[in-house]
Image (spheres, rainbow, N blue to C red):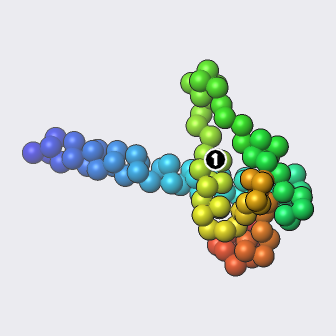
Amino acid sequence: MNDLVIIILLIIVGLLVMFFLPQLLVMRAVPKVIKMFRRYNAVSPRDAKTPEELGFNPRTMLIRMLKPRDYRPRALQVLISQGIIKTTEDGKLYLSEETLGFSRWRGI
């Protein structure tokens, strides 16, 4: 009976890690993305940059196999969905400091 309980607990822990660890890693990547926008001075529509200029280039298959997963693109999508990162008409991106000031990441 003890073996069954241990197996069930391991399965539950494995499922929790499988579902919550990626979300945690995305939230950890959000400050890095915000700092990237500030480093490249993409903080207004006039100074907006393309994703490629900001370093969001797609990884090749070889790089994806050899390096750990990059959670910055998913963090970028989270920030866009919350209106912290805005898009210009020509597809360039910039950080809205005003919207960031009202978000949970305002201290970054």
Which amino acid type corresponds to the residue marked 1 in the rendered image?
A: Pro
Q: Which residue lies furthest to the top in this view?
A: 62
Residue 72 against residue 63 in the figure, above or below: below
User: What residue is disc 1 on?
Assistant: 73
Asked if residue 81 lies left or right of residue 14, the reply is right
Viewer-nearest residue: 77 or 45: 45
Asked if residue 75 lies left or right of residue 47, the reply is left
Residue 60, quarter of the rendered image: top right
Task: Estimate the x, y position of residue 103 in percent, counting from the top left.
Answer: 67, 74
Task: Estimate the x, y position of residue 2 in percent, counting from the top left.
Answer: 15, 45
Residue 27, quarter of the rendered image: bottom right
Residue 19 against residue 100 in the figure, above or below: above
Which residue is located at x 50 percent, y 49 percent? 22
Residue 28 against residue 84 in the figure, above or below: above
Asked if residue 71 lies left or right of residue 55, the reply is left
Asked if residue 6 lies left or right of residue 15, the reply is left
Question: Is residue 35 shown to the viewer in this render?
Answer: no
The 10 Å Cα crowd at callout 1, few under 14, some 14 to 19, many 20 or more, is some
Viewer-nearest residue: 44 or 15: 44
Q: Which residue lies furthest to the front in this view?
A: 89
